């Protein structure tokens, strides 16, 4: 089972980050692709459409917040919508007493039950473990051993009766702060397991039902989660084995199918290897935005110098300033360097000409600007058709490219103006974006 969902998502984000320009059409393309990815991941059609509509509205209908480019904005919006789906808040189970773990065979139920017991212990609470998996021969013994490691009592029925075990266990541990209940899992959700789980749910009346799904499970997590949800309403998801290379894309399918949110992340085999779900970390990884903070810090270096700010606010953003901006951008190491900051991304070979094209263009723009008179550079509005011809000849570049440069300059100037006011600029677009992602820079 390949986590193609996670891979597809990070490919899409890669595309957004590296495309030369993002306009309305590009946004539509991105939305089309996102829709395809979500549908392939078995995210419900209605939910997918709602999500896409929301993103479209935020990017194309509503005004983009000052200080953000369309590229930054769409990244932010996609990120936010995924967080909405997977969970906004770090989880807390404090105050929940009966916590049941369910999931398929090998998904990490038994390990996670013990990890959670350890987690509660660290919070100063008194946890107990209840072993109700009597289908797998060594399951009870596995939990008993894990309980021993952390000094947490484990109860099980000696005659392998899960219902009796449940009733007696709950009674025995009634004075404990919380009871972690390990259940049976099969390689598929067969009828016998389904019946057993349903009945156990009725007996236990759990305060919390956590579905464990391994990070590499992919879209089958969706229908599976739905089935489990029907038997015993799922209240949360634990994504296990996130210490591997898989990105946990299946969580998207599981959460979409059940409206449950991700609560914990398993990051290893040891009992300490459990993390409370953190939306920034989880979604950034799912999107392949590995080292987003470094990326944003780098990007910030390319931001406007303070002395330029005043000029720009007054609308006096000259071609010379524009050229400096282009250069600052290229210093950031256009694309490949940025790409390298994203784990796994640097290894992917971007189409050569994409990077070269950017660098080439910058060079050509330089020739063109050098062929202008100082007056033209300070006041590009005086550049008419005959001046364009002259500049083109002087720089050895086609007239169309001179026009393209002027066009890009004008767009940039307009954007600068629309940022409105010193304050907006000082705050810095990327800084704001970083804040949205929960980073302090
Ligand atoms: P169960 O059948 O659902 O109870 O699954 P287990 O808890 O027995 O786990 C199955 C295997 O996955 C065991 O070898 C665990 O050590 C391993 N495992 C569970 N959670 C994690 C995790 O977060 N990371 C890693 N690397 N292995 C895990
Ligand atoms: Mg087990």
Image (spheres, rainbow, N blue to C red):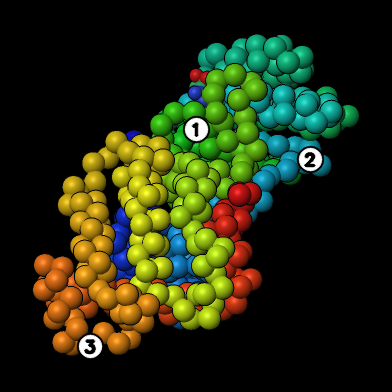
Quadrant of the snapshot with the N terminus: top left
Tag 3 residue? 384
Give the x, y percent position of residue 304. Answer: 50, 62
Position of residue 214 relative to residue 55, above or below, is above
Q: Would residue 125 be found to the left or right of residue 36 on screen?
A: right
Residue lying at 68% horizontally and 29% vertically, measured from the top left: 116
Label 2, secondary structure: give it: loop
Give the x, y percent position of residue 332. Answer: 39, 49
Q: Is mark 1 within 8 Å of ligand 1?
A: yes
**Count of marks overlaid on the render:** 3
**Which mark's residue is nearer the viewer, 1 or 2?**
1
How far is mark 1 from mark 2, CA to CA?
Answer: 23 Å
Q: Earlier in the sequence, mark 2 or mark 3?
A: 2
Tag 1 residue? 242
Mark 2 neighbour class, 10 Å CA radius: few under 14, some 14 to 19, many 20 or more: few
Q: Earlier in the sequence, mark 1 or mark 2?
A: 2
Quarter where residue 151 is shown:
top right
Residue lying at 40% horizontally and 62% vertically, measured from the top left: 325
Residue lying at 49% horizontally and 51% vertically, measured from the top left: 301
Q: Would residue 97 be found to the left or right of residue 359 on screen?
A: right
């Amino acid at each position: 089972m390949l986590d193609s969902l996670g891979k597809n998502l990070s490919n899409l984000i890669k595309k957004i980050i590296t495309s030369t320009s993002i306009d309305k059409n590009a946004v539509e393309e991105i939305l089309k692709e996102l829709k395809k990815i979500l549908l392939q991941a078995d995210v419900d059609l209605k939910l997918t459409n709602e999500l896409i509509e929301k993103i479209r509205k935020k990017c194309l209908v509503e005004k983009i917040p000052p200080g953000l480019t369309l590229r930054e904005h769409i990244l932010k919006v996609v990120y936010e919508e995924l967080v909405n789906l997977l969970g906004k808040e770090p989880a807390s189970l404090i105050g929940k007493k009966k916590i049941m773990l369910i999931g398929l065979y090998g998904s990490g139920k038994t390990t996670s039950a013990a990890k959670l017991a350890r987690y509660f212990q660290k919070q100063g609470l008194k946890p107990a473990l209840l072993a109700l998996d009597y289908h797998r021969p060594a399951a009870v013994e596995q939990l008993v051993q894990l309980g021993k490691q952390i000094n947490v009592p484990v109860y099980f029925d000696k005659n392998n009766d899960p219902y009796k075990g449940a009733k007696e266990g709950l009674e025995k541990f009634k004075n404990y702060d919380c009871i972690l209940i390990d259940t049976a899992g099969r390689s598929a959700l067969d009828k016998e397991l389904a019946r057993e789980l349903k009945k156990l749910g009725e007996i236990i009346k759990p305060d919390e039902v956590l579905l464990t799904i391994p990070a590499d499970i992919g879209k089958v997590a969706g229908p599976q989660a739905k089935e489990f949800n029907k038997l015993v309403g799922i209240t949360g998801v634990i994504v296990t084995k996130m210490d591997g290379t898989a990105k946990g894309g299946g969580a998207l399918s599981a959460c979409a199918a059940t409206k449950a949110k991700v609560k914990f992340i398993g990051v290893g085999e040891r009992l300490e290897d459990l993390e409370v779900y953190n939306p920034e970390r989880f979604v950034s990884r799912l999107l392949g935005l590995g080292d987003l903070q470094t990326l944003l810090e780098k990007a910030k270096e390319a931001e406007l110098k303070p002395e330029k700010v005043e000029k720009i606010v007054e609308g006096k953003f000259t071609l010379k300033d524009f050229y400096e901006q282009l250069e600052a951008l290229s210093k950031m190491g256009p694309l490949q360097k940025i790409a390298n900051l994203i784990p796994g991304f640097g290894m992917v070979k971007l189409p050569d000409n994409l990077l070269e094209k950017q660098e080439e263009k910058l060079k050509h723009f330089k020739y063109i600007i050098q062929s202008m008179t100082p007056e033209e550079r300070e006041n590009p509005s005086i550049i008419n058709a005959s001046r364009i011809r002259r500049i083109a000849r002087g720089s050895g570049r086609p007239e169309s490219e001179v026009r393209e440069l002027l066009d890009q300059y004008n767009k940039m100037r307009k954007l600068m103006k629309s940022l409105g006011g010193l304050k907006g600029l000082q705050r810095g677009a990327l800084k704001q974006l970083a804040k949205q992602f929960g980073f302090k820079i």
